Amino acid sequence: MEGKLVSCIGDEDTVTGFILAGCGHRTSTNSNFLVVRADTPLEAVEEAFRSFTERDDIGIVLINQFIANDIRHLLNDYEKTIPTLLEIPSKDQPYDPEQDYIMQRINLMIGGGV
């Protein structure tokens, strides 16, 4: 996974934190992050997810869980290993491991219920 970027779809605080940590990358044609606000159309979130998961230069897609819930239909159909999807909590929304895409797959692999 050498040279791969970490992308982020999240609320303003989450994305800002990851950009300050050095994960932000922007060119004249694209970036590896999307700040989702209350007025962000769902189509924009879906398009960012599709774009990030189709790019060869992205190895991990971080997404706030409350945003992932809005595009759960896309996450459930996603089957690639790389880029890896990781649902993360936000400071304003609680984290629920039962809704987490990765935790659901782990439970299925070890024979647990969903």
Image (cartoon, rainbow, N blue to C red):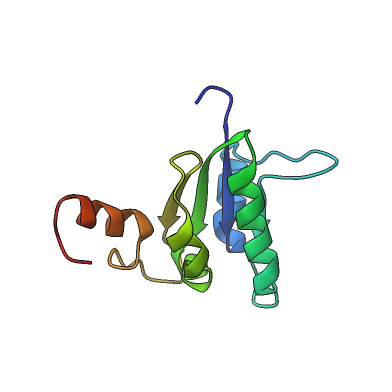
- Image coordinates for residue 50, horizontal then vertical, percent: 62, 54
Q: Which of the 4 image quadrants contains residue 13? A: bottom right
Look at the image and tell me in which quarter the C terminus lies: bottom left
Q: In this view, does 90 lie above or below 110?
A: below
Q: Which of the 4 image quadrants contains residue 35? A: bottom right
Q: Is residue 112 above or below residue 85?
A: below
- The residue sitting at 29% across, 60% down in the picture is 104
Outermost residue, right side: 28
- The residue sitting at 66% across, 45% down in the picture is 32
Q: In this view, does 69 lie above or below 54?
A: below
- The residue sitting at 60% across, 56% down in the picture is 49
Q: In this view, does 86 lie above or below 98?
A: above
Outermost residue, left side: 111
- Image coordinates for residue 91, horizontal then vertical, percent: 45, 65
- Image coordinates for residue 41, horizontal then vertical, percent: 70, 74
- The residue sitting at 47% across, 54% down in the picture is 78
Outermost residue, top side: 2
How many numbered marks does the figure carry? Answer: 0
Left or right: 113 as drawn, with respect to 17 = left
- Image coordinates for residue 12, horizontal then vertical, percent: 62, 61
